[in-house]
Image: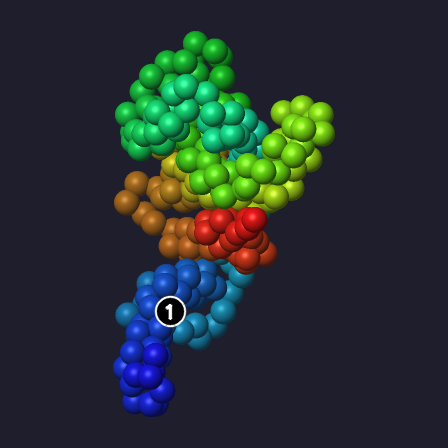
Amino acid sequence: MDFLQSMPRRWVTLYIPMAAFVFILLFPFYWMGVTSFKPDNELLSRDGNPFWIMAPTLAHFEKLFFHTEYPAWLWNTIVVSVVSTFISLACAVLAAYAIERLRFTGAKPSGGAIFLAYLVPPSILFIPLASIVVNLGLFDSRWALILTYPTFLIPFATWLLMGYFRSIPFELEECALIDGATRWQILIKIILPLAVPGLISAGIFAFTLSWNEFIYALTFVSSSENKTVPVGVVTELVEGDVYHWGPLMAGALMGSLPVAFVYSFFVEYYVSGLTGSVKE
């Protein structure tokens, strides 16, 4: 790493690339924030600085929260994301533990098949799922999303937990079995406490995927009060060829904050869950 010691080389190899990366990553959020607080006359004007606000306003947020169904969209998104994430994690834990720790015939092909199921595009799956949702009488309800989101959350969470369970030493289970523990006790009292970083990592992924999901929410929900944030913002704040950019950006900004907070609070568990931190 001697080539990083001199200051010119640090600028060329470290500071400038990092600054460019941070700028490209954060500029869309900055643009959302600026547009959310700009009054309509500044948004539609060709004069002034487009990257700054001359007269900040909260009118777009007032319209969003008091003149649209955005609070209901936000609540629907939270309920659907949290419930579907917990359902998916519960199923993924059982599937990943069975595949990685029980050593039954066909365990490896089963794990590969589960991961391949995740690769199937949702744009193909929503057609047969739509027929099932209608036949069960769940169309235009939260349950339509809660029961369909695990179809793409469980395969990914299972694949992620399989890799983490693989890093837990088998000797821990063998000692527990010798002491008379059951498989359920081993899972609850040994495996899950050691796999907390992996569970949090899988939960963050599942929560993010369900929070940002668009195709199923657009297909299975039609009434305005039952929509989620990604669908409601796009369908309700665009009237024909008229784009209400202020409320649109305010809705996008408010919709992205919960996911950002989740990542910021659990970033250490997220990283360790991806790398596998259990050592013998």
Residue 165 image offset from top left, x and y in percent: 51, 38
Q: Is residue 207 found left or right of 127 in the rendered image?
A: right
Three-letter residue code for mark 1: Val
Q: Position of residue 107 (x, y in %)?
A: 41, 24
Frontmost residue, 9 versus 263: 9
Is any atom of residue 177 visible in this view? yes
Q: Residue furthest top?
A: 135
Residue 74, x across and y down, in percent:
54, 42
Is residue 239 toward the left or the right of residue 266 in the image? left
Which of these two is toward me, 272 or 8?
272
Establish if 191 lies above or below 66.
Answer: above
The residue at 38%/20% (across/down) is: 106
Residue 90 lies in quadrant: top right
Name the residue rendered at 65%, 28% in the picture.
177
Q: Is residue 183 above or below residue 251?
A: above
Can see residue 149? no
* Residue nearest the observer in this picture, 132 or 164: 164
Residue that label 1 marks: 22
Identify the element where label 1 is drawn: helix
- The answer to which of 79 and 266 lies nearer the viewer is 266
Q: Quadrant of residue 186?
A: top right
Query: In the rendering, at what x and y percent does residue 17 appear?
Result: 30, 74
